[in-house]
Amino acid sequence: MPEIIAFVVVGGSALVVAAVAGLWLWPVRRPGRRLAPAQPLDFDTAVRAAEAHVANETTDPEVRPESRSRLLSHGSRTDRAVLLLHGYTLAPEQYDELAQEFFDSGYNVWVPRAPQHGTVDRQAHHRVEAEELTTYAAQAWAIAAALGDEVGVVGISGGAVLATWLAQVPGAAVRRLLVLSPFFGPNPRQAPAYAVRPLILLYGRRVLRDRVTSRGYSLAAVTQYLSIARTLPRPPRRTGLRSVAVVVSPLDGVVDLEAAVDVPRRIADANAIPLRVCTLPEALGVEHNTLNLGTDGDEWRRRYVALYEGETAPTSGLAGRTSAGQ
């Protein structure tokens, strides 16, 4: 029996039985939020806010030095800016190389640390809640939106869920979206579709005591991201997106690869633009972390920027498959 499913039924306790009996009557979706249409930040105010955020982390002994938020600024508002949202259990350093690639391409770049992540307590992420994740994403967007004339979001894994949420939440103006290994659902070998709702309700609502998988993933935490994914509007909203792209690896044993493509495809369709899909070659050996690119990393990161910008042409020398279409 797969590990996650075993956690759902472990013990056969009366609590589980009682909870499961009411699963289909208990709504999973939590109320969405609208990004406040308050006065947008100007560039200088946004930079001061980002720098204050980094300064607070610098003096916080709970935040690991290598995991502090990063602002890569050209010193003035640029034509393009990008927000990079890291994955669950990881921290801003996950994006160091890709952030530099964007910066070298003329972007201002904001890479904020997610709540309960990047701390000396390596299990703090077990306590993360959906509401603080969406608040974090909204606050990060408020800063990023002031850094450039055209602003978009890149997210990986759980960060890709937040990036997609930003691209669909009313009040944002995300123009480009790139999702890497998006965690819209668990790999069916870990938890089939019918188990997602029980997982969210039993662990996400903390009805059952938390469990930690062999990968170090807290079920209480990962189901926070899944609950946010469940709030994405269906059908998706037309929001003015100019490009949508997704990167997946066939070796990824964490995410539902079908959902990883279907969710952004529906969003692209709603905005009457093609979805660009990049499937990494198995020979690359990349599993879930599609930023862990090995010796060909520089070329792949250039391809990622091209995908973000809406280009489909493959980078020379790389064997991955890129496709575009409705």
Image (cartoon, rainbow, N blue to C red):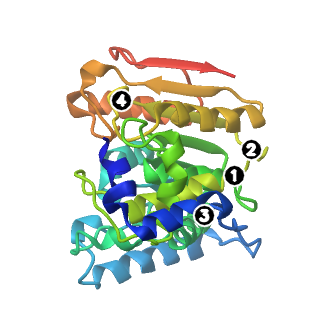
- Amino acid of disc 2: Pro
Residue 121 in view = yes
Q: Nearer the viewer, mark 3 or mark 4?
A: 3
Q: CA distance from mark 4 to mark 2?
A: 29 Å
Check the image and report above or below for 271 versus 69.
Answer: above
Q: Quadrant of the image for the C terminus?
A: top right
Labels 4 and 2 touching (C-beta < 8 A):
no
Label 1 environment density (alpha carbons within 10 Å; few <14, some 14–19, many ≥20): many
- Amino acid of disc 1: Gln
Label disc, if present, on residue 22 of the rendered structure: 3
Q: Nearer the viewer, residue 28 or 305?
A: 28
Labels 3 and 2 touching (C-beta < 8 A):
no
Residue occupied by mark 4 = 300
Secondary structure of the residue carrying tag 4 is: helix
- Amino acid of disc 3: Gly
- Amino acid of disc 4: Trp
The residue that appears at 29% across and 84% down in the rendered structure is 60
Residue occupied by mark 1 = 168
Secondary structure of the residue carrying tag 2 is: loop
Label disc, if present, on residue 236 of the rendered structure: 2
Q: CA distance from mark 1 to mark 3?
A: 30 Å
